Image (cartoon, rainbow, N blue to C red):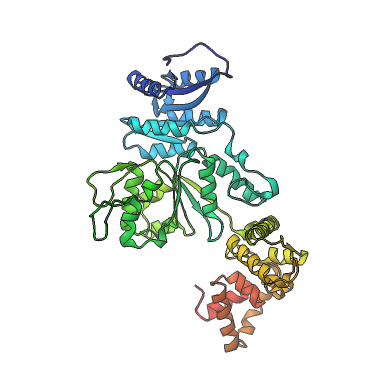
Amino acid sequence: MNSGLPERRSRATVHDVLIVDDEEDIRELLELSLLRMGLGADSAGSLAEARELLESAQYRLCLTDMRLPDGDGLSLVEHIQRHRPNLPVAVITAFGSIETAIRALKLGAFDFVTKPIELQVLRELVHHALKLQPPNPSEAISETSGCTSVGKLVGRSPAMTQLRTLIGKFARNQAPVFIHGESGTGKEVIARLIHSLGMRATEPFVPVNCGAIPPELMESEFFGYRKGSFTGASADKDGLFQAANGGTLFLDEVADLPLSMQVKLLRAIQERAVRPVGAQAEQSVDVRILSASHRDLVKLVSENRFRQDLYFRINVLTLHVPPLRERLEDIPDLAVHLLARLAERDGGSVRTLSPAAFSALRQYSFPGNVRELENLLERACALAENNEMTAEDLGIDLTAFNNQPLMCAAAPCEEESEIADEVDGDMEEISDDERAQVLKTLDETRWNRTAAARKLGMTLRQLRYRLQKWGMDR
């Protein structure tokens, strides 16, 4: 171990840990703890000393206090992100300063530890940090055929390129990540990819659908229980947190958690400990939290249906997954990948799509996103008589596509503006049969009005006008 500034050395020399803290006793405690783990450490008492050390040597980990005589730890986090982005940095913060720690995580810190420092927590933090590999994880995401080497994240669009970059960045820290996207966009695939590229890749990845657990069983499912704690508890059982210990717990559809469970989940995340039902003491758990939902959590918070403190705790980093209709240029890559996977599963030859079939796919809005595309291709494979599947095999109504362009999502398209003035006159001639057909089509598309209008061969504005007249514009 080494206190104070060492002699200037070649940056090719890799050292274990850089400790940055203005309290000498804290530095000594950390150095001794690291020494027991077989790790050496250099230490600095200020930002200026830390920056000089970073210039003179390479490190595998940096531990920095938040309060320093010539600045704060956030400045050092930013400095490291600019000049040494592959160096994991963890911040040491005072007890109760969770907001400050979250700011550090947003700036790029991979984790934090609170004072007074618990040595077990410190050891776990160091263990995970040193498992990070120097290369940027985003580089591990292969662009071959538009797929990733892990998780098959397919697509070459700008949206997917940006998504890959964020996944690589988020994989390098311990901060909770909230993944927002419509149903069928692949939120769990992305969560698994973040886990696989991070320092917990060799540890468990435990997914749970929060909407699938009955409310009365949630506490025992998440935290486990002890024998005899309730009728039927014939033996001790670990919960989801214990199953994910050391790894990642993925909370899918987290918005479906009841408020009573949200309180308990918040405590478990903040304290990094759980109490099994019927147990007298809490158990420490080391879990990274990833969560996802297709619902707007901000709106749910404003409606008092989701706790604001839990929202801020799980939403340290946010990842938005674009719907398929916003990256239609990815459909060829996706279709080729999905058809190859279906052929491998079924043991048959790989089907192909005709140019007209590809054209039809690119014009469809895909309310069910990638999951719907996969189902559509699977059905077409079962029904098609030839190896090359046609637009007819896909079962998409091409009449609407050929008669009008794809509707704009944010503003009326040119064709809508031309017809808008004629809608009033046509409303008197709408029959009960047409109304029934409109409602039937809306049910079939799960009230996706853009998709329904296309199937009905009308513009989106015409459909909206009808629904307003019927008092059904929900």
Q: Quadrant of residue 392?
A: bottom right
Count of all numbered marks drawn on residues in the image: 0
Residue 355: x and y, percent? Answer: 77, 64
Image coords of residue 6 (percent x, y):
48, 12
Work out whether residue 273 or residue 419 is closer to the camera in this orientation and state it.
Answer: 273
The residue positioned 26% from the left and 56% from the top of the image is: 234
Residue at x-position 45% and y-position 34%: 128
Residue 103 lies left or right of residue 134; in this view the side is left
Query: Foreground residue, 303 or 157?
Result: 157
244 sits to left or right of 435: left
Residue at 41% over, 62% down: 212
Please say whether residue 92 is visible from this viewpoint: no
Whether residue 359 is visible? yes
Considering depth in this image, is 226 or 321 the residue closer to the camera? 226
Q: Is residue 106 above or below residue 45?
A: below
Residue 268: x and y in percent read 33, 46
- Identify whether 227 is placed above or below 23: below
Residue ranking furthest to the top: 7
Q: Quadrant of residue 29?
A: top left
Furthest residue to the right? 355
**Residue 236 drawn at (x, y percent):** 29, 51
For the N terminus, the image quarter is top left
